[in-house]
Image (cartoon, grey):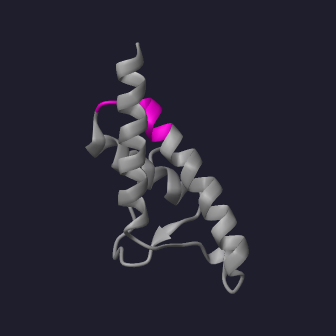
Amino acid sequence: MLKPLVLAVFCCLLLALAACSKPWYNERYRGDKPAMERSFDRDSTECERVSGEEFPLDRTRQIQRYKECMISKGWYERDATIPLKRRN
């Protein structure tokens, strides 16, 4: 019981590091850096939780789900040329 939990937490930490390696931007917070940082922290943590719960052992799917979640909250990667398609 403890091993899956430890693995899920470890995967979430890896996902957080992978997510932090690319800058995210949200048009709603243009010019308000403190608000953007607070909102990013909140949304990123929520998306990490969601992706870790949905795919606890599949890092590739976790990252894809994390990106989809962030896009659904209005965040885009600055270097992404084509946004990911949203699931309906």
Q: Is residue 33 left or right of residue 12?
A: right
Q: Is residue 38 left or right of residue 8?
A: right
Q: Residue furthest top?
A: 1
Q: Residue furthest bottom?
A: 31
Q: Nearer the viewer, residue 6 or 80?
A: 6
Residue 39 rendering spot, x and y as whole percentages: 67, 63
Q: Main SS type for the magenta part?
A: helix
Q: Is residue 8 magenta?
A: no
Residue 34 rendering spot, x and y as whole percentages: 71, 75
Q: Is residue 86 visible?
A: no
Q: Nearer the viewer, residue 57 or 13?
A: 13
Q: Is residue 15 above or below residue 54?
A: below
Residue 16 rendering spot, x and y as whole percentages: 43, 54
Q: Quadrant of the N terminus?
A: top left
**Range drawn in magenta:** 50-57
Q: Is residue 3 above or below residue 49?
A: above
Residue at 30%, 31% (x, y): give it: 57
